[in-house]
Image: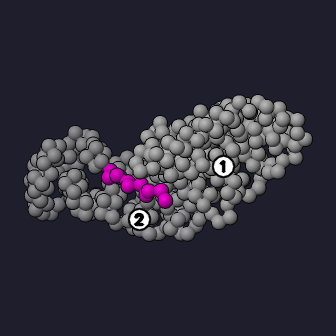
Amino acid sequence: MPRLPTHSFLVPVLGIVLGLFLATGSVLAEEAVRPEVGKPLQAAESLIKQQKYPDALAKLRVAQSVGDLTPYETSLIDQLRGIAAAASGDHQTAAHAFEAVLAYGHQPGAARLAMIQAVIGQYYQLADYPKVVSWVKHYRSEGGTASETLALLPQAYYLANDFANAAQSLRDMIKDEEHLGRVPTESQLQVLANSSLKLNDRAGYNAALERLAASYPKPEYWVPLLQAVTARAGFADRLALDGDRLALATGVLTTAPRYVEFAERALQAELPGEAKVVLERGFSAGILGGGADGERHRRLRTLATARAAEDLPTLTTTEREAAALKDGNGLVNTGLAWLGFGDAAKAADLIGRGIAKGGLKRPDEAQLHLGIARLAAGQKDQAIKAFQAVQGGDAADLARLWELHARAPNAGSGTGR
């Protein structure tokens, strides 16, 4: 399951609210303030600039004690109290102070939106998620567009265990983003995936994972996607090798047992060149060769190397014999062998010729392998077309994942040199 992003959102109150508050150069610039109120206010303002927040709050209490305050004087006190309290970590006091300023209602548009953001930030820090939801909606209704603030709506729903609204608000948000030609953020897709999982919406969860893998390709997203296909009951064993290839290409293959399993499958499929290449990668990465199983890894590499050395000189003859057959099965198989030895262009050519010749035992799997070979050869667009041509069963599910990988930034194949 993807990690729920930890949102560091706390509106930089001193940078936004105080900046707007002091834009005129003084807290006393808009209306008349009595000297007995203005003096401690000016002192509090100066102390806030010096980051002496407890002292500033003390001066504000002096101003508050004057009595018979005008609404404007009260608003000034509340605004400075909110800034000082927020900066010192008293988020409850800050939230109430900023709400009081908003109720006064004399801020210009930009300052008012910044103040609403400040309120949202305080309630987020207090984990009062229903208040966050309410204020984000209010912010949006007043024309607020800051994406970081709007992104708190589905997160607040999620953290309040309202997963249905979290998922729906994210779907709406993502639709708007895509309408503007923007890619949804990783955070949005993470929360959507987790919300769907909490709702036991497996289809929604997998769809969100696929979008994460496509836009933000990381092993943590590919692990559950691959498992959903390759670990399900009835999955065809002969396709496990294609799952291994995708695991290697997406960075999922990270443990010695998985490298060994991949190599053993390749040897069983009579693809010693691929087994040798995979084992060499494991040794180069420092994954194989150490620990209690190190000797076993070395023996397996010796076996794969010997069999690859025997197989490579025969491939040209095998290719001629396959070309003479009535069906294309031999060409497809020989193409896979060349792919294992790292000649992806030759592999793609042979597999393509085999498909064109016809009479294949498993045409959809041949299309899958054609796509893998073309991707390894750098023929991305043609690879995607090949994956899209796969129609049936487990092969089609794997092909969809391969296509997803092919569309990702810097996509490549884990097959070949």
Residue name at image x 80 percent, y 38 percent: 331
Residue name at image x 53 percent, y 54 percent: 223
Disc ID at residue 159: 2
Q: Earlier in the sequence, mark 1 or mark 2?
A: 2
Disc ID at residue 132: none
What percent of the width, then of the height, locates residue 38? Answer: 13, 50
Main secondary structure type of the part rendered in magenta: loop
Task: Mark yes or no: residue 302 visible.
Answer: yes
> Would you say 113 lies left or right of 49 here?
right
What percent of the width, then of the height, locates residue 209? Answer: 56, 55
Q: Pick the residue in front: 212 or 238.
A: 238
Q: Is residue 136 above or below residue 50?
A: below
Task: Mark yes or no: residue 411 visible.
Answer: no
What percent of the width, then of the height, locates residue 74? Answer: 21, 58
Disc ID at residue 268: 1
Q: CA distance from mark 1 to mark 2?
A: 49 Å
SS at badge 2 = helix
Q: Pick the residue in front: 202 or 266.
A: 266
Q: Quadrant of residue 97?
A: bottom left
Residue name at image x 60 percent, y 49 percent: 264
Kind of residue at disc 1: Gln
Q: Bounds of the magenta span?
A: 1-11
> Would you say 135 lies left or right of 256 here?
left
Residue name at image x 68 percent, y 47 percent: 269
Q: Is residue 361 above or below residue 308?
A: below
User: Dot 1, crowdedness within 10 Å: few (<14), some or many (≥20)?
Assistant: few
Return the residue found at the far right: 326
Q: Quadrant of residue 208?
A: bottom right
Mark nearest the camera among 1 and 2 is: 1
